[in-house]
Amino acid sequence: MLIHTVIFWLKKSLNTEDRSQFFQGVEKLGEIQCVKHNFIGTPANTTKRPVVDDTYDCALTVVLKDLKDHDLYQVDPIHLKFIKECSHLWEKVQIFDAD
């Protein structure tokens, strides 16, 4: 199993329509055939602690079968369309892959 976690920091200047476009795009990623599970979230209102980074706007976790499916996910037309249509909306992205 491969866990692909992507953390997005959106541009501060986005309006409601821009944010909606982004989150709709993120939701579409779950339709990629090789995705076993996906989870989308925003920072939780947990107690502030030095080890917690809640400065991001969206966390996406995608569960894939293996590295082969990860590689298929990266070149899937849905993923490529998301990058093309939404990359101008984020200021920073950080990826964590675990197996």
Image: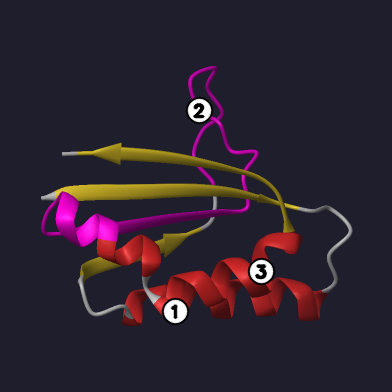
Rendered image quadrant of residue 98:
top left
Residue 22 location (% of width, % of height): 64, 71
Mark 3 Cα within 10 Å, few/some/many (few <14, many 20+)?
some
Q: Which residue is mark 2?
A: 52
Disc 1 or 2, which lies upstream in sequence?
2
CA–CA distance between discs 1 and 3? 12 Å
Residue 91 location (% of width, % of height): 74, 47
Q: Circle 1 sits in a helix, a strand or a loop, which is it?
A: helix
Which amino acid, mark 3? Cys
Q: Which residue is mark 1?
A: 78
Residue 53: in magenta span: yes
Toward the top, the furthest residue is 50
Q: Which mark is residue 86?
A: 3
Disc 1 or 3, which lies upstream in sequence?
1
Q: Residue at x 19, y 61 (%)?
A: 69
Which amino acid, mark 1? Ile
| Quadrant including the C terminus | top left
Confirm whether residue 44 shows in the render: no
Which amino acid, mark 2? Val
Which segment did they paint magenta? 45-71
Confirm whether residue 98 shows in the render: yes
